[in-house]
Amino acid sequence: MKKVLLAFGIMLGMTSCLSNVELADEAKAKESQAQILSYFAKLNQNPIAIEDGSYYYVAKPNVAGEKASKGDTVKMHYVLSNLLTGEVLDSTNNPLVYQYGFLNPIYAKLLAYIKEGEQAVMALPGTSQSFVGLPAYTPLKVLVKDYVVRSQKDQIEEYIAKKKLTVTEQTANGLRYIRLNPGTGEIPASGKVVKLKYTGRFLNGFAFDGNMARTDSFSVTIGGSSTVVGFQTGVEKMRLGERAILVFPSTIGYGEKGSGSSIPGYTPLVFEIYVAKID
């Protein structure tokens, strides 16, 4: 990725100006809009007007594509350029991957209108601020291509396929229960205390918590609510000596807020659990 500092200066600076400040010179504003409309007219394209005097056009539609929602992972290539001269200000060599809804770069405005697999162009009016390669009041062109949306469901299914896991049971709220070794006896009744050994991981394999290497155990009361729903529900399916993997979305995990500094919001989780004792 080249000229990254310049790009983010443009992204943040123009976002701020477009959101909070009107163009100081009305004549320049009208000229900027005329330049945008002229650009699309020369290409015989009918752009759609959006906020702040911006326009976008979908060059490659994908009607069946998925739209990004907050917390989804998006992967994309983009090109930022001077609309009038075509000078490239920034572009991606490798795909940019980030969690949608937590950053507000200039291209995020366009992602709110397009779907996975679509290629689109957005033109934004210039502002009184100038950047290298983009003089004041010069429209900015944003090209988004190779756009992929991965919801938590998509990420979980990809993880299970990659690990070649066989799902024993899937609940309506999104929990995937994968039995590795069966246990013995009955499923513990409500009120019983289950002593567990576990490892908690993100889908990328990073272990954020666990006690497998320690001598202590983690206690969960059957029918209780001291743990997140996905973990509690999975444990309540296990017998003594059973080993299983639980994979679940943030909706039954730590939600949009996450947990402290260790688990970000909108994060699906994986737990490997062993039932060591039942009291």
Image (cartoon, grey):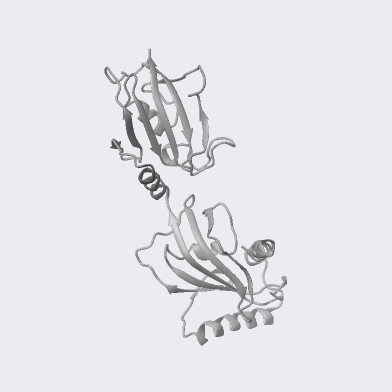
Residue furthest out toward the top? 279
Q: Residue at x 69, y 65 (%)?
A: 6
Relative height, residue 32 to residue 73 (above, below): below
**Image quadrant where residue 125 sits:** bottom right
Relative height, residue 273 to residue 128 (above, below): above
Residue furthest out toward the bottom? 42
The x and y percentages for residue 199 are: 47, 29
**Image quadrant where residue 178 sits:** top left
The x and y percentages for residue 9 are: 69, 63
Q: Residue at x 57, y 80 (%)?
A: 36
Horizontal placement of 95 versus 182: left or right?
right
Residue in front for this viewpoint, 174 or 19: 174
Q: Residue at x 60, y 83 (%)?
A: 35
Residue in front for this viewpoint, 241 or 130: 241
The mark tally for this picture is 0
The x and y percentages for residue 246 are: 38, 34
**Image quadrant where residue 4 sits:** bottom right
State which quarter of the image contains the N terminus: bottom right
Relative height, residue 157 to residue 184 (above, below): below
Relative height, residue 244 to residue 16 (above, below): above
State which quarter of the image contains the C terminus: top left
The x and y percentages for residue 152 are: 42, 47
